C-alpha cells in the first residue's frame, strides 16, 4: 500500500482509493476515499457561504471534536441545494462507507463537488462504495487528486517533509480548483494528510493560519461556493514526539503547512478557467495588514484590472482607482505603483518617461507582480490572481449547454 | 435660446453650449457648458472613491454651500491622478470660464471624464472657452449630452414636467455611462436642470434619495470611478411657490426626480459595454431593505451569474450561491427563485418539472427579471444589471491598444 511516492519516504498509516462510479462522464475517477489506519486528528475550514451543501453541514458537525478516521469524496454532484433528501443521501453514503470500513458513522467525513441543485444518483454510490473500500490496498493520493477534478486541467498535489525530535514526518496535500471560478461546479476542495503527531489545538490554529495566508489569498472571480472544504488529517504514525505550538518544531510545521498550501493555491490560480496570466498583487505601506488585504483583493477582483492584464495594457489608472474604492485608507498623493521593477506611478501621478513601454513589457510576461505602496504605514498583504479572458466568458457561458 | 425641446414647454432660465475643443477625437463635441441666468441652488453627489479627480475635489467644495450658476464639463481627459498641476489646471479652466461669464470663480462647478493620469491639454481649453461661452445662445441640452459621451453609443436625455401651486415646471437630465464599466474612462456623469423653485435643504435630501434608488441601484462591474458626479441645478425661473419637503408638492417633485434618474440609470445599463441583456434583480422577503440590496448587488455583480445570463443558461444554482455569500441573512431552505414568472427553485431546491426549459426561454429574451424571495421579512430592493459578454472583455482589454 501507499505504493507511489515521489520523494521523502512513504506516508505512514494512510491508505487511498478511487473508483469510477459513473457520477461524472464515463472514463473518469469520481469517488474517492482517504483512510487512516490509526485514530487521527483533523482540522477543517468550510465555506462561509450561508448556502451550504449537505456534506458541508455534516462534516462541519463531525469534525468539530477534532478527530476522524476517513474521508469520502465525490465529484460530479455537489449535493448542494438538495434539501432534506440531500442530507439523507449524504448520511446513507456515509453509513455505508463507515460500515464497510468498520468505523462509527461519526468517524467519517464527506465532501462533494459538482453540479448544484441535483439529487445524488444514489444507485451509483451504492454500487461504488464496496469496490472503493476494496481498493484501499492499491490506491494512491494521485488517484484521489484525479477523482476530485472537475474542470481542472491537471491534478494538483504537493508534498513536504519535516522532522520533529529527530523523527521524519510527511505532509501531503491535494486540491481541486479552479478556485472560485468554477461555473456551477462547487468548488474548492483541498485535503492534506500528515503522519506527524500534532497537538490537536495547535493543528487547528496552525491550519487556520496557513489557510488564511494561502487559500484566502487567492481570487479568480470572488465567488465563494456552497461546498468549499479544506482539511488536514494527522495520524501520528511517524512516531515523532507530539508537535506543539510555540516551539521550534511547531514553527517548522506551520511553515511547511503554509508553504504546501500556498503552492497548491498558486496551482489553482494557474489552472483558473481561461487564465493566461498569473499575477501577484502586493500591497505594502498600508495603515495595517487588514487594509493591505482589502486593497489587494479589490485590485485582484476588479474586472477592469483583470481585462487590462489580459490585454497586456499597462493601465495603472484602473489599479489606483480600485485601491481608491476598496475601503482601505488611501492618500492618493502618496501612492506608488510598480509592475515588477518598473515604477508606473509615484505620488499618485504617472511616472512618465519610458514607464508605459517598460510596463507593457512586464505585462507581456505570463507571470508578474504588481506592487502598490500606500506609503502610510507598515501593513502588507499579497494576493494571487489571474486575468479575465475571452475563455473565461466562453467556459462559464457555455458550461451547461 | 433653448431652441430645442421635445415636449412640456421650454426650460426657463437655462442656456447650454458645446464645442469641439479637440480633447477627444476630431469631429466630436467634448467641451460643454450649462448656465443659469438666475442664481440657482445645487445638490450634488460625488464618487466615494478615495482617489478623486481634481474637478471632483474642486466642485465638492464649491457646491457645499448649495448654490451655483454654471457647470463646465469636458470629456476625453478625466484630470484624475494629475496631482498639483491637475488642480491648477482645473482652477485655471474655471477662472477663464467664470470670467467670460461674468461670475465669481466659486459660482462655477467643473466635471471631467476621460483618460486617467494624463495632464489636461490646456492650450485646447484656453482656445475653446470663449467660443463655448459665445455659443450659449444657440446650444441645447442635447449638445451637452453628446459632448459628455465617451464610449457611450447614444446620448442619454430624459425630461419630466411637474406642477406646483398651479405653475408648471420642468426637470431635464442627461447622463453618460456606460456606468462603472468604462475602461480607464472615468466614468458616470449626470446633470439635471430644473426651473422649479425648490427649498435648498429639500433639494439636497430629495436628490440623495432619488440617486440612491437609481444610480446606486445599477451595476455593471462594480467598479467605482475617480470622477463620478451627479448634480441637479434648480433656478426657480418657473416662478412656482417654493417646493418644500413633507408636502404633496415635495412628494411629487421627489417622484419625478426619481423617475427621471431611474430612466437615465436604465439607459446606462442598456448601453453597458458589450451588454446583450438587461436584467432586473429583485430581492424580497429579506430581513430588511439593506439585506435585500446586499443580496441583489451580490447576484448582479457575480461573474458566474453574469456569464450565465450571457449564455442564456437557467443556472439558478449560481444565483443562490451568490445570495449565500452576499452577507445578507439567508435560510437556504426558504429561498425561492423566479425567472420572470417561472419558479426555478423553492424551499432552496430545484422546482423540477419544466422549470429548466421554461426558465431558459425567459433568459432568451433581451430583458427579464430575476426575483429572489428570502421568505424572512419585508425587506425589498431592486438592482439593474447587464450580462458579461465576450465584447465586455474585448472592449476593456483592447481599449488603449
Image (spheres, coloured by chain):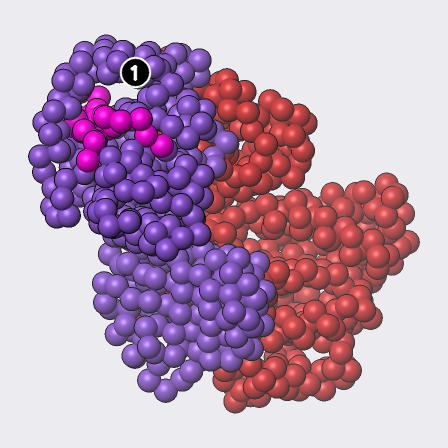
Chain colours: A purple, B red
Residue at point 33%, 77% (across, down): A341
Instruction: Give the residues in magenta.
Output: A12-41
Residue at point 79%, 55% (across, down): B203
B1, B257: nearer the viewer: B257
Question: Horizontally, is B383 left or right of A97 in the view?
Answer: right
Whether B84 is drawn above or below B228: the answer is: below
Residue A228: x and y in percent read: 38, 35
Q: Secondary structure at mark 1?
A: loop
Residue at point 40%, 25% (across, down): A59
A322, B75: nearer the viewer: A322
Whether A85 is drawn above or below B7: the answer is: above
Question: Horizontally, is A126 left or right of B19 in the view?
Answer: left
Whether A231 is drawn above or below A55: the answer is: below
Question: Horizontally, is B188 left or right of B63 in the view?
Answer: left
Q: Dot 1 corresponds to which residue?
A: A103
Residue A237: x and y in percent read: 24, 35
Locate the C terminus of chain A and report the quarter of the image it occupies.
top left
Residue A183 location, quadrant: top left
Question: How many marks do you count on the picture?
Answer: 1
Residue A241: x and y in percent read: 31, 42
Residue A115 location, quadrant: top left
Amino acid at each position: 500500500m501507499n505504493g507511489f511516492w515521489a520523494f521523502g519516504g512513504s506516508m505512514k498509516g494512510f491508505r487511498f482509493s478511487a473508483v469510477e462510479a459513473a457520477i461524472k462522464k464515463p472514463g473518469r475517477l469520481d469517488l474517492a476515499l482517504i483512510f487512516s489506519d490509526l485514530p487521527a486528528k483533523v482540522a477543517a475550514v468550510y465555506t462561509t457561504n450561508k448556502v451550504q451543501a449537505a456534506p458541508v453541514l455534516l462534516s462541519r458537525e463531525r469534525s468539530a471534536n477534532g478527530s476522524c478516521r476517513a474521508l469520502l469524496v465525490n465529484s460530479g454532484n455537489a449535493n448542494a441545494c438538495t434539501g432534506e433528501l440531500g442530507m439523507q443521501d449524504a448520511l446513507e453514503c456515509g453509513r455505508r462507507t463507515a460500515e464497510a470500513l468498520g468505523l462509527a458513522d461519526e468517524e467519517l467525513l464527506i465532501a462533494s463537488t459538482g453540479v448544484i441543485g441535483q439529487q445524488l444518483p444514489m444507485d451509483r454510490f451504492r454500487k461504488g462504495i464496496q469496490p472503493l473500500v476494496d481498493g484501499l490496498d492499491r490506491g494512491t493520493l494521485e488517484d484521489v487528486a484525479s477523482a476530485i477534478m472537475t474542470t481542472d486541467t491537471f491534478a494538483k498535489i504537493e508534498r513536504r517533509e519535516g522532522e520533529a525530535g529527530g523523527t521524519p514526518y510527511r505532509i501531503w496535500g491535494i486540491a481541486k480548483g479552479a478556485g472560485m471560478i468554477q461555473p456551477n461546479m462547487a468548488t474548492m476542495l483541498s485535503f492534506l494528510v500528515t503522519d506527524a503527531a500534532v497537538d490537536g489545538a495547535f493543528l487547528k490554529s496552525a491550519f487556520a493560519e496557513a489557510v488564511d495566508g494561502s487559500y484566502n489569498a487567492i481570487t479568480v472571480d470572488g465567488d465563494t461556493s456552497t461546498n468549499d472544504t479544506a482539511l488536514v488529517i494527522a495520524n501520528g504514525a511517524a512516531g515523532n514526539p507530539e508537535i506543539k505550538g510555540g516551539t521550534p518544531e511547531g514553527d517548522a510545521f506551520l511553515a511547511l503547512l503554509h508553504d504546501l498550501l500556498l503552492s497548491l493555491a498558486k496551482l489553482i490560480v494557474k489552472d483558473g478557467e481561461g487564465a493566461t496570466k498569473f499575477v501577484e498583487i502586493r500591497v505594502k505601506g498600508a495603515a495595517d495588514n487588514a487594509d493591505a488585504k482589502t486593497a489587494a483583493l479589490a485590485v485582484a477582483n476588479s474586472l477592469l484590472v483583470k481585462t487590462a492584464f489580459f490585454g497586456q495594457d499597462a493601465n495603472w489608472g484602473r489599479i489606483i482607482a480600485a485601491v481608491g474604492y476598496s475601503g482601505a485608507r488611501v492618500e492618493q498623493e502618496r501612492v506608488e505603483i510598480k509592475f515588477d521593477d518598473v515604477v508606473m506611478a509615484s505620488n499618485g501621478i504617472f511616472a512618465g518617461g519610458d514607464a508605459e513601454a517598460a510596463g507593457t513589457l512586464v505585462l507581456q510576461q505570463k507571470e508578474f507582480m504588481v506592487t502598490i505602496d500606500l506609503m502610510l504605514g507598515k501593513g502588507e498583504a499579497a494576493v494571487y490572481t489571474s486575468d479575465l479572458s475571452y475563455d473565461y466568458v466562453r467556459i462559464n457561458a457555455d458550461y451547461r449547454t
